[in-house]
Image (cartoon, coloured by chain):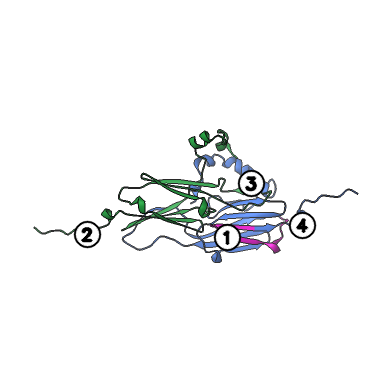
Chain colours: A green, B blue
């Protein structure tokens, strides 16, 4: 398609794992409240079975692929999105509880909720008068 | 706004793309051109029988998308509501890259389209508009007598 894909042979698994396929970077919103962090990511064209969310250590990885119904014989006249893959990764901080992450995908918008660990929930600290 | 859609190496390709633009109607660029980087991102393709427009517009209520075809010009209007809470002192917004607000995008279509038979569908945040081309414009095999 373009020079990005030309320098490797995509047929060999070794080459594929060594250099990940080029991907678009989805725009995100990140909001934090008292009990956790919510991340929204725009992933248009991605059905649920093409979305892969991965947590490895403190890394949250989003990898997704568009699935568009392209008619036969379609030739592109104008393309603002030239790739069909989305990828982005985030580093979680340690007060977040990676084991309780939940996610939903609706009309191309991914919503990920990462709650804070119980020990990190807000507490009001009483000031003692001594 | 949607700059993050484009990895840096694609920016280097803009010159090449600019040259390709002319192919949509003829060798001179369309007067409306194509504004890049807007919401929603648009891909346009043609088949021998139809023009296909893909608008990457995640997070919309399909009922609120206003789609008009007037004299060969396709207009896409709508509004994307903010998903972030406002006015809550206990929330912190760390990142706001996603588009919010009203949008409008315009596409000039080729002359040979049939405006009477447009169809549009919205799935997984992608609006696909199919505009058939008139039969006279479609390739035909000519029988030699």
In space, the residues marked 2 and 4 are separated at their CA atoms by 73 Å
Instruction: State whether discs 3 and 2 lie on one chain.
Output: no
User: Are discs 2 and 1 less than 8 Å apart at CB?
Assistant: no
Of residue A12 and residue B28, the one placed in the foreground of this image is: A12
Residue B30 is situated, as x and y percent measured from the top left of the image, at 65, 51
Crowding near the residue tagged with mark 3, few <14, some 14–19, many ≥20 C-alpha atoms within 10 Å: some
Instruction: State whether discs 2 and 4 lie on one chain.
Output: no
Q: Circle 4 — which element? A: helix
Residue at image x 55%, y 37%?
A4
Picture quadrant of residue A34 = bottom left
Q: Is residue B126 magenta?
A: yes
Report the mark closest to the observer, 3 or 1.
Answer: 1
Q: Which residue is identified by label 4?
A: B135
Residue B85 is situated, as x and y percent measured from the top left of the image, at 38, 62
Instruction: State whether discs 2 and 1 lie on one chain.
Output: no
Which quadrant is the N terminus of chain A positioned in?
A: top right
Tally of numbered tags:
4
In space, the residues marked 3 and 1 are separated at their CA atoms by 26 Å
Q: Which residue is identified by label 2?
A: A124
Chain letter of disc 1? B
Residue B144 is situated, as x and y percent measured from the top left of the image, at 88, 48
**Residue B122, which numbered label?**
1
User: Are discs 4 and 3 less than 8 Å apart at CB?
Assistant: no
Marked residue nearer the N-terminal end (4 or 3) = 3
Q: Is residue A30 left or right of residue B145?
A: left
């Amino acid at each position: 398609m373009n020079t990005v894909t030309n320098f490797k042979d995509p047929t060999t698994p070794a080459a594929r794992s060594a250099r990940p396929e080029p991907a678009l970077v989805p725009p995100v919103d990140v909001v934090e409240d008292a009990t956790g962090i919510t991340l929204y990511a725009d992933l248009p064209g991605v059905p649920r079975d093409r979305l892969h969310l991965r947590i490895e250590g403190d890394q949250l990885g989003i990898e997704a692929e568009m699935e568009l119904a392209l008619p036969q014989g379609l030739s592109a006249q104008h393309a603002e999105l030239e790739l069909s893959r989305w990828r982005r990764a985030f580093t979680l901080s340690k007060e977040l509880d990676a084991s309780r992450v939940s996610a939903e995908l609706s009309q191309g918008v991914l919503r990920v909720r990462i709650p804070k660990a119980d020990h990190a929930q807000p507490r009001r600290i009483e000031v003692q008068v001594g | 706004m949607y700059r993050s859609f484009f990895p840096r190496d694609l920016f280097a390709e803009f010159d090449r793309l600019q040259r390709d633009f002319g192919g949509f109607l003829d060798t001179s660029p369309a007067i409306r051109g194509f504004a890049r980087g807007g919401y929603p991102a648009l891909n346009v393709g043609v088949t021998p029988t139809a023009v296909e427009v893909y608008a990457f517009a995640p997070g919309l209520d399909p009922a609120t998308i206003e789609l008009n075809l007037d004299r060969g010009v396709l207009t896409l209007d709508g509004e994307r509501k903010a998903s972030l809470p406002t006015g809550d002192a206990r929330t912190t917004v760390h990142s706001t890259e996603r588009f919010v607000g009203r949008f409008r995008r315009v596409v000039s279509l080729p002359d040979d389209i049939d405006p009477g038979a447009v169809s549009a569908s919205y799935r997984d945040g992608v609006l696909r508009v199919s505009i058939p081309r008139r039969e006279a414009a479609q390739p035909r095999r000519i029988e030699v007598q």
